[in-house]
Every structure is written in C-alpha cells, then in structure tokens.
Image: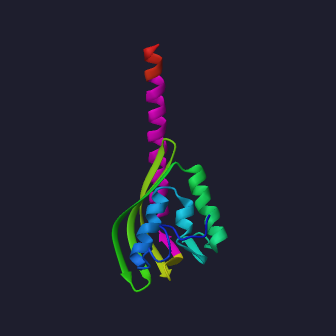
Amino acid sequence: MSGQPAGGSAEARSTDPVDVVRAFLAALDRLDVDAALGYAASDIVYQNVPLPPARGKSAFEKQMRFLARYGSGFEARVHHIAADGPVVLTERTDVLAAGRWRAEFWVCGTFEVSGGEIVLWRDYFDWTTVLAASARGGVRALAQVVRSTAGRAARR
C-alpha cells in the first residue's frame, strides 16, 4: 500500500462522511482491500455485533484480506443512508459470494468518520437470516453443480 489515500491525493478526496462511506463500500464491492484500507483510520474499530470487535488497522486488514482471499464477491446494496455529523447510518442488503455460493441478507451499519477516515464500522444483522441465506446459497450452488454435471453427461 502506498500510504496515499484511496481515490487520489488528500486534496481531491472528499471528507464528507457520507461520501467516505460510499467510497469505502464501493472499494469493498470491487474487493479492492488496499483502497478500502485507505479509508480506515489507524485506530479503526470494526464489529459484526455480537462478535468481538477488531481493533486497529492491522486487525481490520486481516479480516478484509480474509474476505478477499476466500470470497469471490461482495456487494453492499445501500437502500438508505443518513448522516448526523460524523455518524453515518446505512440500511443495506449485503451480498457475499464464494465460487457458486451466494448469500444476500439485510444489514444496518453505523460508521463514524473523522478527518475523512472511518474510525468505527459496526454492523447489525439477524444471524438467523444470515444462516438461512447461507443455506439457500449452498443449495443453489449444489443445484448448479448437479445441472452442470448432468448436462455434460447428457452430451457424451
């Protein structure tokens, strides 16, 4: 990582909290961990409630690199976004993908932005919904494999 903020020079990048969160989520959509890290403060706190938080950029980077290494896709479909000063609230559908597996689930997120950097990212979602979406994604992936295998066998 070059140390330069994502999106160019510090002068060219917006420090508006909503703009920062949108740009950060767009970097994650591209699985561009380096660009996403450019929006993270050195003391960032990242938490998927009720799991323990990752504290500091190093711990945060480890989780983001895990997502990029084992996932083949991420999408944050923002339905609503609102700010109260440095605090940005999002209501989203997050989509996780790994190979043929795909899970979509509802998420509410809280971001705190200071000086154009995210100092807090805390997501809230229903774990039952995530597990159900994961199971549906697994069934769909398995069905695709079975159809693909059956199609190849029929062509022989």
Q: Quadrant of residue 40?
A: bottom right
Q: Residue at x 47, y 29 (%)?
A: 146
Residue 79: image x %, image y %?
A: 33, 66
Residue 34: image x %, image y %?
A: 57, 62
Residue that sits furthest to the right in the current view: 58
Residue 70: image x %, image y %?
A: 59, 50
Residue 149: image x %, image y %?
A: 48, 25
In the rendered view, does 62 fall on the left or right side of 20? right
Question: Most prominent secondary structure in the magenta stretch?
Answer: helix
In the rendered view, does 80 fall on the left or right side of 110? left
Eyeballing the image, is 136 above or below 56? Answer: above
Residue 42 falls within the magenta-colored stretch: no
Eyeballing the image, is 104 above or below 59? Answer: above
Q: Residue at x 57, y 72 (%)?
A: 46
Eyeballing the image, is 137 above or below 79? Answer: above
Q: Which residues are magenta?
A: 121-150
Q: Quadrant of residue 105?
A: bottom left
Q: Is residue 125 visible?
A: no
Q: Quadrant of residue 144?
A: top left
**Is residue 104 or residue 89 the one in the foreground?**
89
Q: Is residue 92 visible?
A: yes
**Is residue 55 or residue 28 the one in the foreground?**
28
Q: Residue at x 55, y 50 (%)?
A: 71
**Is residue 85 or residue 138 the one in the foreground?**
85
Check the picture and name the quadrant holding the N terminus.
bottom right
Q: Residue at x 41, y 69 (%)?
A: 22
Residue 127 falls within the magenta-colored stretch: yes
Residue that sits furthest to the left in the current view: 79
Residue that sits furthest to the top in the current view: 156
